[in-house]
Image (cartoon, rainbow, N blue to C red):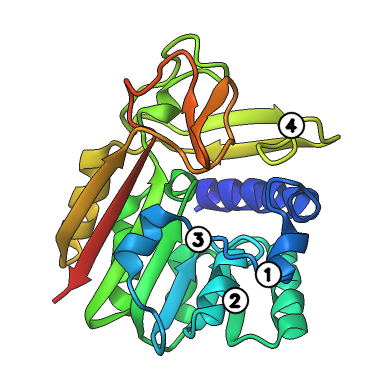
Amino acid sequence: MEEKLDYISINKQTWNDKTDVHIGSEFYDNEGFLKGKSTLNAIELELLGDVKGKKILHLQCHFGQDTMTFARMGASAVGVDLSDKAVQRATEFANQLNLDATFVCCDIYDAQQHIEEKFDIVFTSYGTIGWFPDLEKWANVIAHFLKPNGRFVMADFHPVVWMYDNDFKEVFYSYFNIEPIVEEESGTYAETQADLQTKSVGWNHPISEILNSLLQSGLELNQFNEFDYSPYNCFNEMEEFEAGKFRIKAFGNKIPMVYSILATKK
């Protein structure tokens, strides 16, 4: 229990510290978002389909841009995040825009204690599961919140990407989940020169662990896709080889950058 409280408190502080920097960053373009810009990418939109009239639970929503994009698409959306500052700002923006989006601050593992509804879609994306030590617990949360025939949609950075050092010069970390990874960082992926010092605790999860956790929770795997690009310029040493598509310059199309999952609760 002490270990859980430690990583939770460390990571919550980190994301509280990052929130204000991210909201003002060019990376998130919150000004454009508030004017109507969608924040979803083709990778996840292909799996989501038409969400009009659907109830969507967005896990690890940060300050809610994707959650509110769902609301703009006609869904009723609930976003969950560990950072109370992010949830506060998301709530402010949703009220400002008069959207059908609400936000809950809690540890995802404890979400059942805070949310009573069931959902047509559970969604999570980009930089999410590395904050969890136990994916079986994570997958059980997803299965709990899905209605029968409900869909889980996920897009995230491929675990191969997390093996490398920050400048992609060498394989630095194990592909497998063997121990917590404690890192101290200057700046942030959204604002590399920001005057910000943070500490975080994370875990690498191989594809087998991700898929097996979902299957063991009772979900049926419908699609698993891998992509040789990222829709975000959020790592060092990247190049934009097509509009909105980024790769590690030295690697080209030789490694997977992103994967996506569509699974269904039967």
Task: Find residue 138 and report its horizontal and vertical position in percent.
Answer: 36, 59
Viewer-nearest of labels 3 and 2? Answer: 3
Task: Find residue 11 and report its horizontal and vertical position in percent.
Answer: 62, 48
Q: Nearer the viewer, residue 62 or 251?
A: 251
> Which residue is farthest right?
195
Query: Is the residue under label 1 in contact with that under label 2 (CB below 8 Å)?
Result: yes
Disc 1 designates what residue? 87
Instruction: Please tell me which of labels 1 and 3 falls first in the chain.
Output: 3
Q: Residue at x 60, y 62 (%)?
A: 82
Instruction: Please tell me which of labels 1 and 4 falls first in the chain.
Output: 1
Viewer-nearest of labels 3 and 4? Answer: 3
Find residue 192 and name its label: 4
Find residue 40 and name its label: 3
Helix, strand or loop for disc 3 = loop
Helix, strand or loop for disc 1 = helix
User: Which amino acid type corresponds to the residue marked 2 in the rendered image?
Assistant: Val
Helix, strand or loop for disc 2 = strand
Q: Residue 228: name its quadrant.
A: top left
Query: Is the residue under label 4 in contact with that under label 2 (CB below 8 Å)?
Result: no
Dot 3: few (<14), some (14–19), or many (≥20) neighbours within 10 Å? some
User: Which amino acid type corresponds to the residue marked 3 in the rendered image?
Assistant: Leu
Disc 2 designates what residue? 104
Dot 4: few (<14), some (14–19), or many (≥20) neighbours within 10 Å? some
Relative placement, left or right, of 7 versus 186 is left
Viewer-nearest of labels 2 and 4? Answer: 4
Instruction: Please tell me which of labels 2 and 4 falls first in the chain.
Output: 2
CA gap, disc 1 to disc 4? 23 Å
Q: Nearer the viewer, residue 98 or 108?
A: 98
